[in-house]
Image (cartoon, helix red, strand yellow):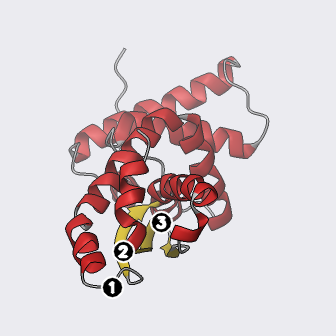
Amino acid sequence: MEIRIEIPDEQVAVIRKAFRNGQLSDGEIQQKFAQLALNAWINWISGSKRYNSLTDQYMDWIEDCYSSLLSESEAPSLDRLYNAFNIPYGQAQYISRVLNNKTMTRWRHKAICDLKEAMAKRLDDADKWVRTGREESNLLILVDHLGLLELKMTWERLFRDQRENFLLPKTITVGNLCEVSIPAKCFRLIYESIEE
């Protein structure tokens, strides 16, 4: 059976803002969103899905949105949940963390690849700085919060074993974006120690 609905322009604008990603046309986004909304109501009416809390319900809906409407390469992020889905900041942090942990293997591999790519761009600089006596100077890289987590795990593992060789990293985090300062003297060792 085919059902047609008319969506007011202001609602179309909300959907467009929430799911802009360049992957789907407006028509495809609206069609898939309408199907998700219908599925959510049918699941509730039929009793096939029951939630323990509103947060559980939000997580399920958000997971459906990510799998149907957004790029496969996009991990659930605080930025999209807070800015595009208008979820309160603390709840958006929690939901993005839980959803990322739920699919950690997939996102962890992507985070490691992105981290290694960011560090690879600065390897020559790090080596040059060490050769020219600037080994205590910091090189900056930009990663997302999962990349930072992988970096911290690697750093912690190395720091336990070689404490005298390491200075602690400095980080500035804004939403999902993290700027990390890594001392040149341990840059290559960290890069080569990241486990895939």
Residue 173 lies left or right of residue 1; in this view the side is right
Q: What kind of residue is marked 1?
A: Arg
Q: Does 39 sit above or below residue 160? A: above
Residue at the disc numbered 3: 83
The residue under label 1 is: 134
Residue sitting at x 51%, y 53% = 154
Q: Residues within 10 Å of mark 2 (few under 14, many from 20)?
A: many
Quarter of the image that includes the N terminus: top left
Residue 125: image location, x then y, percent: 23, 73
**Tag 3 secondary structure:** helix
Q: CA distance from mark 1 to mark 2?
A: 7 Å
Graded by Cα atoms within 10 Å as few (under 14), some (14 to 19) or many (20 or more), the crowding at tag 3 reads: some
Q: Position of residue 18 (x, y in %)?
A: 40, 55
**Tag 1 near tag 3, CB within 8 Å:** no
Q: Earlier in the sequence, mark 1 or mark 3?
A: 3
Position of the C terminus, as image quadrant, is top left
Q: Residue at x 33, y 42 (%)?
A: 73
Q: CA distance from mark 1 to mark 3?
A: 40 Å
| Residue furthest top as drawn | 1
- Labelled pair 1, 2 in contact (Cβ < 8 Å): yes
Mark found first going from the N terminus, 1 or 2: 1
Query: Which label lies toward us, 3 or 2?
Result: 2
Q: Any mark on residue 50, and which?
A: none
Q: Secondary structure at mark 2?
A: helix
Q: Which residue is mark 2?
A: 184
* Residue 116 position in % (x across, y down): 32, 53
- Camera-nearest residue between 17 and 134: 134
